Image: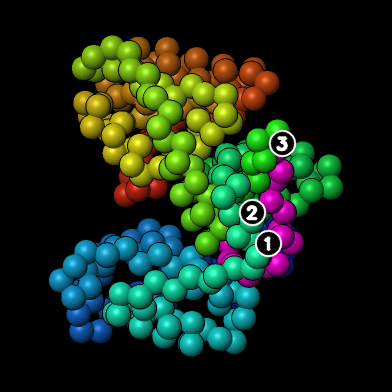
Amino acid sequence: MIVWAQDLDEREIPPMSAEMFSALVTARLRPLDGIEIRGGKGLALQLRVKGQDATARLERAYQRYRANPELLSPVVEQLIHALLSGERAEQEGTAAYAEIAPLLYPRFMTAQQWRAKRDAGLRPVIRPLVQDLGVALVIDRGSEIEFVQLDAIPGWGVDAQQAYDTAIKNLEGTASVETIQRGQGDETLLIDHHADGYAAARALLASRMRDWQARIQGELVLAIPTRDLLLGFAREHPAFDDLRAQVQHDAQTQDNGLFSQLLTVRDGALELLAL
């Protein structure tokens, strides 16, 4: 397994890990009236705030802290205030970001692919996802795809989380790409096969995953053997072993091969399927 955070850039290693930051915020929230902590994973906390279910996404606060560790207390206090008041602060960004924002998209990338970009002199922005699979940011100009590099985001006047949120929102706009469904019941196979380069990345869309789960009996299993293919099927699919073998073969042999292992969705996050 490749440890992305260490590979990317030593400057990216913060004084406090994301896990410790989340634990600190949780500890600060726990004694407050009106807030009930229901659970959480990584930098996302499931809360009940003043009787309403809410998700506290800590990425932006963590990025601000990481950029200025001495501002830990003000960052956490601002986060808590925003949660209690229902505010969601976003940076407006620069004119350059306003121009780029509609062109931002997420694209899956393996550690090997990232290393190849690095060896070519690029430093793509990458966010670890699962095992050696990460999510890069690209600028899609139609005729060409440009990978966003680490030095670009500070000049946009936004943080990395806001850029990723924008990319996911733009990807939502491609969700009208039709899902092909073959078979019924346990034999249902869902297919997003599209040469736009984002078929696999649509596994990040909560709306699509909810739709696919509703079509599948039992646990939804996902496969992303290539960048242009996303598959969904039941854990109890009668051809499960054959499907898994084909995914491994395609991931290792296709020119745009991506990920050979199977995934599932738990608590809104992609995880490796335990076999």
Q: Of residues 68 and 18, which is closer to you in this image?
A: 68
Question: Does 197 sit above or below residue 32?
Answer: above
Residue 249 percent location from the top left of the image: 56, 16
Residue 149 vs 233, above or below: the answer is below
Q: Who's the residue at 25% across and 84% down the image?
A: 32
Element assignment for label 3: loop
What is the CA distance from the residue labelled 2 to the residue labelled 1?
6 Å
Element at label 2: helix
Residue appearing at x 64%, y 68% in the figure: 94
Q: Which mark is residue 144?
A: 3
Residue linked to disc 1: 96
Q: For the point 68% across and 21% down, which residue is it?
A: 255
Look at mark 2 in the image and give the residue it sits on.
100
How many residues crowd mark 1 within 10 Å: few (<14), some (14–19), many (20+)?
few
Residue type, label 2:
Ile
> Tag 2: Cα neighbours inside 10 Å, few (<14), some, or many (≥20)?
some
Earlier along the polypeptide chain: callout 2 or callout 3?
Answer: 2
**Local secondary structure at mark 1:** helix
Residue at mark 1 to residue at mark 3: CA–CA distance: 18 Å
The tag earlier along the polypeptide, 1 or 3, is 1
